[in-house]
Image (cartoon, rainbow, N blue to C red):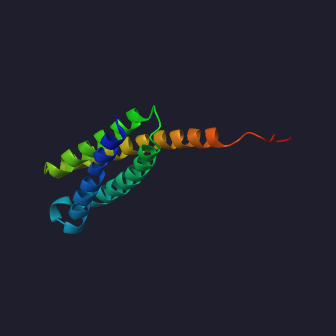
């Protein structure tokens, strides 16, 4: 994935976050049973988008897979939210989406930790 493609692909996060915010603010009686899950999904996706942006800006090789997974989950959330599914379907799918996002965020955190550790000079020893 080229740097331009990565950054363009990240715009899906803004679009989906706007859709989720509209759904939250709409306060539809139809979704009252899953409103808390939609709020949580919005928060998780917002955090994921921020984390993915950090990785994309660094443009280091080997991170294309995690970027693709993140963009894929954003498209999946968009599909689930914008397809006007019944509430019982949202009750099943929203926790799955939240879990997928959390797993991707954990993978990104591992990448960030490896980058941070690799960037720290090892000029000292810890005595015991």
> Is residue 25 depicted above or below 57 in this figure?
below
> Is residue 67 depicted above or below 23 in this figure?
above
Residue 86 in view (yes/no):
no
Q: Position of residue 19 (x, y in %)?
A: 22, 58
Give the side of residue 60 with respect to residue 43, left or right.
right
Q: Position of residue 17 (x, y in %)?
A: 28, 57
Q: Nearer the viewer, residue 115 or 36?
A: 115
Q: Nearer the viewer, residue 65 or 33?
A: 65
State which quarter of the image contains the N terminus: top left
Q: Position of residue 91 (x, y in %)?
A: 25, 49
Q: Position of residue 92 (x, y in %)?
A: 26, 44
Give the quarter of the image for residue 123.
top right
Give the quarter of the image for residue 102.
top left
State which quarter of the image contains the C terminus: top right
Name the residue: 45% across, 44% down.
Answer: 55
Name the residue: 25% across, 60% down.
Answer: 18
Name the residue: 39% across, 34% down.
Answer: 64
């Amino acid at each position: 994935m080229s740097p331009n493609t990565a950054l363009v692909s990240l715009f899906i996060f803004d679009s989906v976050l706007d859709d989720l915010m509209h759904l939250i603010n709409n306060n539809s009686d139809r979704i009252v049973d899953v409103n808390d899950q939609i709020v949580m999904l919005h928060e998780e996706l917002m955090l994921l988008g921020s984390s993915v942006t950090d990785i994309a800006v660094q443009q280091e090789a080997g991170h294309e897979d995690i970027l693709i997974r993140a963009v894929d989950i954003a498209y999946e959330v968009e599909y689930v939210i914008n397809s006007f599914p019944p509430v019982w379907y949202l009750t099943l799918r929203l926790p799955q989406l939240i879990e997928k996002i959390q797993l991707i965020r954990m993978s990104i955190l591992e990448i960030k930790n490896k980058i941070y550790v690799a960037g720290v000079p090892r000029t000292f020893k810890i005595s015991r």
